[in-house]
Image (cartoon, rainbow, N blue to C red):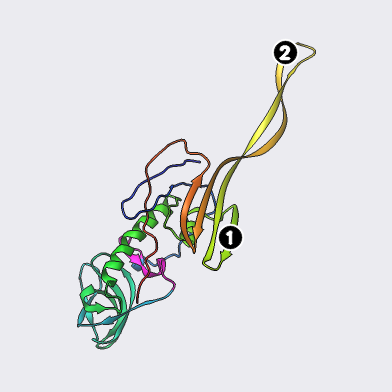
Amino acid sequence: MKRGIHAAGAALALGLAVPVGAEVRKAPARSLIDSDPEVVYVEEFSAKPIELLVVKPGAVYATKQGKRKLGNLKVDSKATLVGFDERAYKVRGTGQRGGISGWVSPQALGSKDKDFVENLKKVYRRQKDVRELIANQEVAIGMNLAEVSQSLGRPTKTKVRQTAKGQSGQWEFIEYEEIKHYQTLRNPATGGLYRQYTHTTVEELSKLVVEFENDVVTAIEESENNEGGRVRIVVPPIVFGW
């Protein structure tokens, strides 16, 4: 198992980035239309839809670069956020002639959360970091348990503690290896030495312990690290005031 500690620059959290040979839960497949690697999709971080209010006539385009205008969003209607990058939002909403889906400027949309534009930028940077971690089968403090599961697979052992303040616990990812044991014997006929297999034991090769509180990773411990490395930093999940 190759182990390492890596770095990114975004929040005050320390994490070990460790590939493991566990079963990996793949992310839901998307159509070719919704598979742009530079776009973050709402389904990646929220089980609930995010609805925004159309505050001014917003031109809807087929691409995030603003090519091929499809129409305009109807003012005072609601639009459901589908995906976004740092400059444009992909939404489903109501146009002058019915339903419409495409890319719009953030300036055409509003929210109860006055900081929603900046918050989405934080989410964008966070999800890009998380995607990289998952692609490399790594984990870092600040990830949630669903992301850890998607990255590392099913834990070998779990421990959960429920208190009045919430839930805490730890997941252990353990890698084992088979060790064959031999004994040295002397051939009574020739006097030569030879090795004879005696038995096989299964021994712990390495262990990664992920501690969490209320679904967010708070500490990571590994049993060995022969490579060294840098600190990996990941922004914790963003809480919105929609």
Q: Earlier in the sequence, mark 2 or mark 1?
A: 1
Question: Which residue lies most toward the right here?
Answer: 188
Task: Assign a secondary structure to mark 2.
Answer: loop
In the rendered view of the protein, which quadrant contains the C terminus?
Answer: bottom left
Q: Residues within 10 Å of mark 2 (few under 14, many from 20)?
A: few
Q: Residue 155's spot in the image, x, y percent?
A: 56, 54
Q: Residue 238's spot in the image, x, y percent?
A: 37, 66
38 part of magenta stretch: yes
49 or 23: nearer the eye? 49
Q: Residue 181's spot in the image, x, y percent?
A: 68, 30
The amino acid type of the residue labelled 1 equals Val
In the picture shown, does residue 62 fall above or below 37?
below
* Image-based side of 188 in relation to 57, left or right: right
Check whether the beta carbons of the residues at disc 2 and disc 1 lie within 8 A of each other: no
Q: Dividing the picture into quarters, in which one does residue 57 lie?
A: bottom left
Tell me, yes or no, if residue 149 can be seen here. Answer: no
Label for residue 22? Answer: none
In the picture shown, does residue 201 fall above or below 239?
above
Q: Residues within 10 Å of mark 1 (few under 14, many from 20)?
A: few
Q: Residue 27's spot in the image, x, y percent?
A: 45, 62
Residue visible at 49% across and 64% down in the picture: 214
Q: Dividing the picture into quarters, in which one does residue 78 lie?
A: bottom left
**Which residue is the site of mark 2?**
192
Give the magenta-colored segment's residue range.
35-47
The amino acid type of the residue labelled 2 equals Gly
Mostly what secondary structure, the magenta segment? Answer: loop
**Which residue is the site of mark 1?**
160
1 part of magenta stretch: no
Task: Assign a secondary structure to mark 1.
Answer: strand
